[in-house]
Image: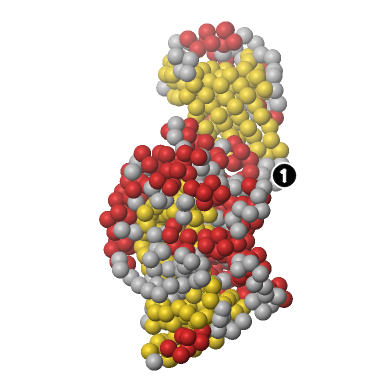
Amino acid sequence: MEHADLLVIGGSVVTMDASYRVLAPGAIVVRGRDIVAVGQAQEMKEQFAAAEVLDCQGQIVIPGLINTHTHMPMSLLRGLADDLRLDVWLYGYIMPVEKQFVNPEFCYLGTLLSCAEMIRSGITCYTDMYYFEEEVAWATVEAGMRGVCGETIMKFPAPDAPSYDDSLAYCREFLEHWQGHELIIAAPAPHSVYMCTPDILQAATELAREYNVPLLIHVSETKDEVEDWINQTSMPPLRWLETQGVLGAKVLAAHCVHVNHEEVHILKKHDVGVAHNPTSNLKLASGFAPIEEMLDTGINIGLGTDGAASNNNQDLFEEMNLAALISKAVAHNPVVVPARQALMMATISGARALHLDHLIGSIEVGKRADLAIVDCNSLHTVPDFNTTGLNVYSQLVYAAKSNDVRHVIINGRVVMRDRQLLTVQEDSIITQARQVGEDVNRFFVKREKSLLEKVAAIGGLEREESYEVQVKASVLDKEAFEARLKHPDIAIVRETVREQYDTYFMFSDPTWGILRHREDLVIEADGSLSPIYTLTVTGPTKEADYGDAIVLSRSRLTAPANRTLRFYREYFRPSEERQINKKRYRYRIRYRGVDFAVNLDQITQPAREGWYAEIKSRTWSRRDAERKAAMISELLKIFDVKSEHLIRKDYVDF
């Protein structure tokens, strides 16, 4: 009789091998990390003596599930901000919180939390894309899980790297450190085409090829993302990635929701694996991936949960169920993605997508002993049938739940027995996660109470205060006003003609002030338009009044606006909007050695007769403001502006 370390015996063994063998009752013999025999229960019992026997009578033994796309530490951000579009969710909420909180300790704890959740749901291997992947890897090893840990690289500063050069250096060191590890595969993970430059993508590709590891990337998740990329490059993302040589690596592309027919064949041509994320795609309204066409083309598709901040769980049983049901509804065909194919996506097809099918994904001799044992003796899983030979797959995909998983074995080691986690201190992790949640909550609540905090949080905006002395007046004769710009004490430094489209956000809380989004189109000499987008917060009150309707106003923050108006509308949620459009003749002048701006405006929406003039100058002290206010009074006389023409309202109040 041969010796073994573990004998898993008595259950229905769903092998997911090439013949889709189901052995009932079956047995699996494990020695060390490997499966050394698979067969009928009685035969294996007679042939092998094992140090440990796991009796699985009445249960189903399946290959450990493979989560092909997630963000492990983001379990600590679960439920932070929901029911938002992807860009608002990512740029408005997740990235500002990450900037504040993501550090090595955050990633270590969040990974342990995710590992515990995944083990409980039968997941034995995952693919991650996040920051501080060194800590992610160590936590994974502690939990006894298998992980493909992708170090995120992008063109923006990241929590673990101030520049993409630093990200690439960190990634190389990370790959070197974990090369050849039993449980961890370190991988480069350039975030996406829109968050990377061609140089970043090509450098990441070279790293993946040099170390012979997968390259992980988000591809074509949303319609807007794809349309923007086509507008920039005249090519859809996958076609463009092919031209950059990126698909020459072992690529795993997450999402692939909006890929066209040509791109599907590009995926097949380069053996690109796809991580399909049904729940995340539904929740973020990203759309429906062409799964039927991909399967018909022979693409290897795995299932992913995405991060717990956008799902909000890491339950692959849910993903199997949805992958089957959604595909049927989209195709109007109930035979599309049958239950067995859905289980394939969560096991052997996911392993193929990761180029790891030689090690995991099925129950076969020579592969790693990664197993999940599902107890199907619950109300929602009985009775059992064997009418078609496919009933067991239906039971797993359409009836079973993640909490039916009773035992989990990874790399030959039992990590959960009878629903008890053996490698992770569950109570301690929950306590620590709640504490992090309280800290994030305080930060979040404080930010949501302040318009200035919300503006400063969304990245690329510098928090600063500027002051302006300014006056506004109606102009009876535009030509006469412009003629006075030739006064001997006035020198025109620069003049431009612009079309300005101002959207003012008003808020129910008067202390917030007003937020203005401006699209400023400078009309060039050849008639072309050069756009400038700005975002400005103005306080609710004026700082001082100097007579002649000259006021000192404060702009709390002025910065480039690098998001869409729709983004700002959904992010700031104003109680009211007002639109002011105008044509502006803008003059930069020097009067007696001091810089001023003189604007001549024609308001086109809401339409108003006549022209309006603004005279303003930046200032930095009260004494300077008083001096410039006196000079503006002098300019009013030069421009022949009478007191009855002065206006004390802003355009938004007209």
Image position, residue 460 (x, y; %): 47, 44
| Residue 451 image point, x, y percent | 61, 46
Q: Is residue 562 above or below residue 299?
A: above
- Say left or right for 524 vs 398: left
Name the amino acid type tagged 1.
Answer: Ser
Assign a secondary structure to mark 1.
loop
| 314 relative to 593, above or below | below
Quadrant assignment for the N terminus: bottom left
Q: Position of residue 543 (x, y in %)?
A: 60, 38
Q: Residue at x 56, y 41 (%)?
A: 223
Q: Mark 1, residues whose alpha carbon is within 10 Å: few (<14), some, or many (≥20)? A: few
Look at the image and tell me in which quarter the C terminus lies.
top right
**Which residue is disc 1 drawn over?**
508
Asked if residue 458 shows in the view, the reply is no
What's the residue at 35%, 41% (across, down)? 244
Relative depth, front residue between 3 and 223? 3
